[in-house]
């Protein structure tokens, strides 16, 4: 499979996902920008292609970061925007729909955990 084909499919999926309704949510997590220490954050919305999370310190567009959600390995992403203490990031690899649905099933909008 050539890389151009794979990238094209990712961009199409990401764009379709971007226009889909995003789930407002509150998930305590850790976020680490490349070259910096991880900090506690709250994920505000989550989709297959990305997320937004609180980030009081400025995060620079184009920089690589890692999001660690409870019970999951760190997910690599790229900062797409930062505004008023919130960062919007695109995952390097699309999130698995199964993982996405499990995360949403575990957390309600108020940040409480469902077992």
Image: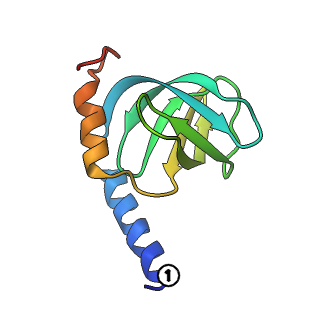
Label 1 neighbourhood size at 10 Å, few (<14), some (14-19), many (20+)?
Answer: few
Residue wearing tag 1: 4
Residue lying furthest bottom: 2
Q: In terms of image quadrants, where is residue 113?
A: top left
Q: Is residue 75 left or right of residue 26?
A: right
Q: Is residue 71 above or below residue 9?
A: above
Q: Is residue 6 above or below residue 46?
A: below
Q: Quadrant of the N terminus?
A: bottom left
Residue name at image x 52 percent, y 56 percent: 92
Q: Is residue 15 above or below residue 20?
A: below
Determine the secondary structure under disc 1: helix
Q: Is residue 6 left or right of residue 66?
A: left
Residue name at image x 51 percent, y 30 percent: 53
Task: Measuring from the top left, give residue 46's x and y in whole percent.
Answer: 37, 38
Q: Is residue 95 above or below residue 29?
A: below
Residue name at image x 23 percent, y 20 percent: 115
The count of marks equals: 1
Q: In terms of image quadrants, where is residue 66?
A: top right
Q: Is residue 112 left or right of residue 39?
A: left
Task: Measuring from the top left, give residue 5's x and y in whole percent.
Answer: 43, 81
């Amino acid at each position: 499979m050539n890389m151009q084909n794979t990238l094209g499919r990712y961009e199409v999926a990401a764009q379709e996902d971007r226009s889909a309704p995003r789930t407002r949510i509150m998930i305590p997590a850790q976020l680490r920008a490349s070259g910096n220490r991880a900090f506690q954050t709250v994920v505000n919305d989550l989709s297959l292609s990305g997320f937004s999370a609180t980030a009081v310190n400025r995060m620079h567009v184009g920089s690589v970061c890692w999001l660690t959600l409870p019970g999951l390995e760190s997910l690599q992403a790229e900062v797409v925007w930062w505004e008023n203490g919130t960062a919007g990031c695109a995952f390097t690899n699309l999130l698995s729909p199964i993982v996405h649905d499990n995360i949403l099933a575990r957390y309600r909008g108020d940040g409480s955990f469902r077992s």
